[in-house]
Amino acid sequence: MSDTSLPKPRSEMGETMHHLLRDPLGLVGLVIVTLIVGSALLAPWIAPYDPIAMNIPDRLQGPSAAHLLGTDQIGRDTFSRVIWGGRVALQVALPTIGGAVAIGLILGMAAGYGPKWLDTLIVLFFDTLRSFPTVMFALAVVALVGPSLNTVILVIMATSIPTYGRVVRTLTQSLKEAEFITAERALGASTLRIMGVHLLPNVLGPLAVLAAMDIPTVVGLEAGLSFLGMGVRPPTPSWGSLLNDGYSLIRNTPWLIIAGGIPLILTTIGFTFLGEALRDVVDPKLRGKGGK
Amino acid sequence: MTVLDIQGLSVSYGTPRGELRALRDVSLSVPERKIVGIVGESGCGKSTLISAIIRLMAPNARVRSGTVRFNGQDLLALPEARMRGLRGTEISMVFQDPMQTHNPVLTVGRQMIDIQYRDKRSKADKLKRAAEMLALVGIPDARARLNQYPFEFSGGMRQRIAIAMALMARPSLLIADEPTTALDATLEVQIIKRLRELQDEIGCSILFISHHLGVIAELCDEVVVMYAGEVVEAGSVRDVFHHPAHPYTRALLECDPGHIKEKTRNLPTIPGNIPDLVSLPGGCIFADRCPQRHDACTEHPVMSEASAGHRAACHLIKAGAPA
Amino acid sequence: MSALLDIKDVVVRFAVRGGVFSSAGSIDAVSGVSLSIEEGKTYGIVGESGSGKTTLARAVAGLHHASEGSILYRGQELRDLPEAQFRKLRREIVMMFQDPIGSLSPRLSVKSLITEPFRIQGMKGRDLDAEARRLLAMVGLPPEFATRYPYQISGGQARRVGVARALALDPKLLIADEPTAGLDVSIQGEMLNLLARLQDELGLAIMIITHNLNVVRHITDRVGIMYLGKLVEEGETDTVFSAPRHPYTLALLAANPEPDPDAQLMRIELQGEPPSILNRPKGCEFHTRCPFAQARCSTEVPLWQIAGRAAHRCHFPASWEQDKACPA
């Protein structure tokens, strides 16, 4: 009896996936997101052509067996550019959101759990950052240092920090008064332990939902800046530059605009569905209601 | 004359694990001008029973069989519009949490006028009635306090206001769901006493739900004991509390620390848990926790008469083995 | 017979922020409480909501700061003790909280929860699996419970987990805040029996906070009745229950209706509602609700009077047959 080891609890991750797969919308979201991420990762192998190789004789073609989504004004394969564009979109979205979440998490928890003066200071910092409208701020920075992928990442990241930071701060503040935190204090847990072991896991869930639903926004923002010529520089393929090209060539072919628009819409739908499903799954109390 | 008459009521919930049979063949009646108490612990089906009576059931709940007659008409067959007309006028409710039953942004007077919307009288008249009701439940200086907001009252006062509002329309049935559980003991006795006086004055019947045996003993005329979705014993308070016929009732009474006169460091308990209502065991629902379990208990007992008007669902009654 | 915990004139003061209608100030949630708990004994603190009983408990556990008075634990002053030093004492002074499920970190398994004290107190090299099994067995939960999460267990089971965590490090003083709150009557007894058994086995002192006098009667050695931040009666449990002196104690005793429709109750009717701690009544704080109050009660603060093995603060206490003196 005393030799039997205790059964291992199912991991948090495994539990989340298990419940996610049961939700039809979550499943759709997961499939779309996997498709987008997968094709972006495998771009060099799935894209049939080099996305920046010109082929003037084949310019402005409609969809065909050779070019699934046709070609642009200098004969580049649109399908290949869409796939490579996804890579660029995620290259922008993931570090941006990852960075913003990480910084927002640290600052938000410090503000929510720390002393009053620290809270005031951090909230002031958030408010200052937030008072810049993202697009205007981006345009100003680009005007100063010139367009580049890194500039876009930094600008969007800086302006998203307050969003995450404020959510984390509010969650931390409400959890701080919860009885289980007092109970931990009574056991003698250090501040670091309370923040890392007890607050963090309870904040992470809602934050992951927020981040997942923010990815399309950032992708759209990158596309928008690229559309304006302020983001990714040609000839690097981006959904935004596809739209830009398509917009000026709308009278010649509708395919460029469609090819740039559809992945944007799919990204929005995929990540939003996934986020919604995650929201239900990360709340352990809602999960319990499913009845096991 | 019976105000509320429930016969053979069975209610189930659809759950991912299967059908959860929350109420099974529940029968009880509330006579005119009587206070009937329902006693039971968590999971006994009290809340399902109330929601079935006022027909505000969870979306996954389903009435499998039975009737709920209120002054002769079957509530379960009534059109929704008629049912809505009954709630708040002929059937009123008081809930456990007095903090959540009031609208926080309206004055108490405003809310008490609003619930008289069916009356054609003038606003001044309605205000006067509101003040009268507040005075009746024991709120001093009622007229002036009508202009105050719910947060300006203490928990005990708010529960008094909730009772005043529930009785305003002079309902024939008041359903009180653990109305004193959230209150301190000294306030609890004050409210119980007031409720008794009001019931006498207004002449309504009360269905009083509580897990507190002492309160039931003090307030009610009759008592219904529920366990795991079934009625296991029913009768006058005196019969049930002095001569409990069902082993569960007996165990429950023994567990009440107010009942134990001798100081002890080993308090009585009921070992075991409530059975899973999705996969019910056959036979008597209390059998696996019952100290008097015997062969007959594999068969489900029917309610049988222990004495006149006092019934319990236990095989021992027929076997002629009184407590 | 030395006191494990000795509380003297403790005041816990909270700052009140000024609102639109009120000015800033402070309230004394605990207003001068003295009591002492002996090793291995149980002390019950009884009071209704707003009496300051939980605040007092938390002050002893170092979760609230006591503004005045002294809290001596084995002769060591706990008041103003820096958290770093208090942390070492948290092995010996432990607390059980009111909300059984809400006081458990929701994303930790039961095993992590009950072995946390070892990690927090830096007791490395322990076989945590073995400790988890030992603690679960001690509170009467099957080993499978180790893998459950707080949302998967019932209130009564969560209570047992709370006991297991509190007793993991073999403490000397357990502060139990409403250990039976929210439990069905049939389970309430199990919880109290468990505490009594563990007290006998481990020899710990228990400070139990409750509003339920019946609970206190069976398991405590001494009892203190609190009203509006002060003790009004204090003494040996048997004495307080057999001959209560303070009208508030009488009212509390009477306010617990017996499950007997024919019980002849000696009911003490209280008037009105408890006053707000923001405007504490002058004189005896109970006089606004006291059925026996006289003019003197609203001006003069009653002092402690000893009667047998208990003491009370009342100008007109109840008298009992065993008193030699004639009733006034």
Image: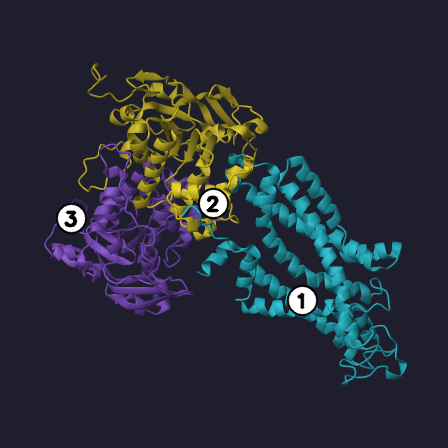
Going 29% across and 23% down the picture, which residue do you hit?
A: C245
Q: Residue type at mark 3?
A: Asp
Percent coordinates x, y for residue A10 in the rendering? 52, 56
**Where is mark 3, residue-wise?**
B239
Q: Are marks 1 and 2 in contact (CB under 8 Å)?
A: no
Residue C282 location, quadrant: top left
Mark 2 residue element: loop
B198 displayed left or right of C18:
left
Cβ–Cβ below 8 Å for labels 3 and 2?
Answer: no
Task: Kindly indicate the quadrant of the structure image that contains residue C292.
Answer: top left
Q: Which mark is residue A268?
A: 1
Same chain for the residues at labels 3 and 2, yes or no? no
Q: Secondary structure beneath disc 3? A: helix
As drawn, the chain in cyan is A
Picture disc at residue C304: none
Chain of the residue under label 1: A
Residue under pointer 2: C102
Which of the pair C62/A49 is nearer the observer?
A49
- Residue ranking furthest to the top: C325
Q: Residue at x 50, y 53 (%)?
A: A9
**Measuring 30% from the left and 38% from the top, which residue is drawn there?**
B190
Name the front one of labels 3 and 2: 2
Q: Amino acid at mark 2?
A: Gly
- Marks 3 and 1 sit apart, C-alpha to C-alpha, by 68 Å
Label 2: chain letter = C
For the N terminus of chain B, which image quadrant?
A: bottom left
Instruction: Name chain B's colour.
Output: purple
Question: In the rendered structure, which amino acid carries the disc numbered 1?
Answer: Thr
| Along the line of sight, the residue nearer the viewer: C244 or C294 | C244
Is the residue marked by circle 2 packed among few (<14), some (14-19), or many (20+) residues within 10 Å?
some
Label 1: few (<14), some or many (≥20) within 10 Å? many
Placement of B312 over or under A265, stated as above or below: above
